[in-house]
Amino acid sequence: MLCHICGLESKPNLLLSSHYRAKHKDIAKDMYKTDLYIYNGRPPKICKVCDKPTKIPKGEGSYPEYHSKCYIKLLKSSTAESNANWKGGKITKKCDFCSAKITKHSSSFNGRTTFCSVGCSTRFYYCKKNGISISEYEPSMNIRNSLIGTSTSALKRRCFKAADYICDICGVRGGKLNAHHKKSWKFHPEDRNDINNLVCLCQRCHINFHKQYGYGKKDPLTEEQYEKFKKAHQSGPK
């Protein structure tokens, strides 16, 4: 930046401090500062609220369009289109899963994915996780994650009651129980709702089994894996 009086080139903060005190102290600082910025191609802007010039900011920042107090007044008094932060009001988009139309304020959309309900969101990410296209999705695929799932819950209760709420591996009664499918859910869809395919396990044993053998999405021999796991656990130290 150049000094508009003597032509010295320096940083704005030096021209407004040490250079001003040494060379141009006889001039009012506000006037010197205004003339300095105008000379360097930065004329002040007029506030759109009070029609007065805005203050010259420090450094090389651009002139603001409003005074800070005027901007606050504008936000409080304005509504809808007259507000400085107006972003277009409500807009209409399609659900990324079922293509249903959704009308909301633009700020409600996250800019990446749009869903009309929690169910559509669950089904969309289920397809994405398992590599299934949306057109191939069937409700029976995601019955475990269904929000309704009343038949599945009833089946679990029958499994727990038949086992007298005792874990089939460690023999502990009660606590947090899980109904484990001995035959893989993925490879044996015909046995998903078979009570004889379910076994009552405590959460700890259930987690330990899946940590060792996975979740049955690659190997269909999960029944044999379960028998090996049960035999090894029961024969080991307690």
Image (spheres, grey):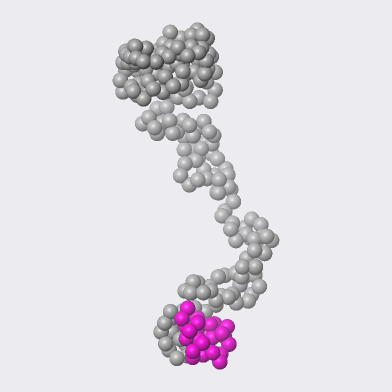
Residue in the foreground of this view, choosing between 183 and 214: 214
Quadrant placement of the N terminus: bottom left
> Is residue 189 visible in the rendered structure shown here?
no
Identify the residue shown where x is 49% and y is 18%.
177
Identify the residue shown where x is 51% and y is 87%.
21
Whether residue 20 is in magenta: the answer is yes
**Residue most extreme to the front:** 237
User: On the picture, is 228 further left or further right than 36?
Assistant: left
Q: Say if 76 sits above or below 48 in the image.
A: above
Q: Say if 68 sits above or below 40 in the image.
A: above
The location of residue 170, given as percent across then percent down, is 43, 14
Q: Say if 216 sits above or below 131 in the image.
A: above
Identify the residue shown where x is 56% and y is 55%.
87
- Look at the magenta stretch and give its main secondary structure: helix
The location of residue 33, given as percent across then percent down, is 53, 82
Residue bounds of the magenta highlight: 13-38
Identify the residue shown where x is 46% and y is 21%.
203
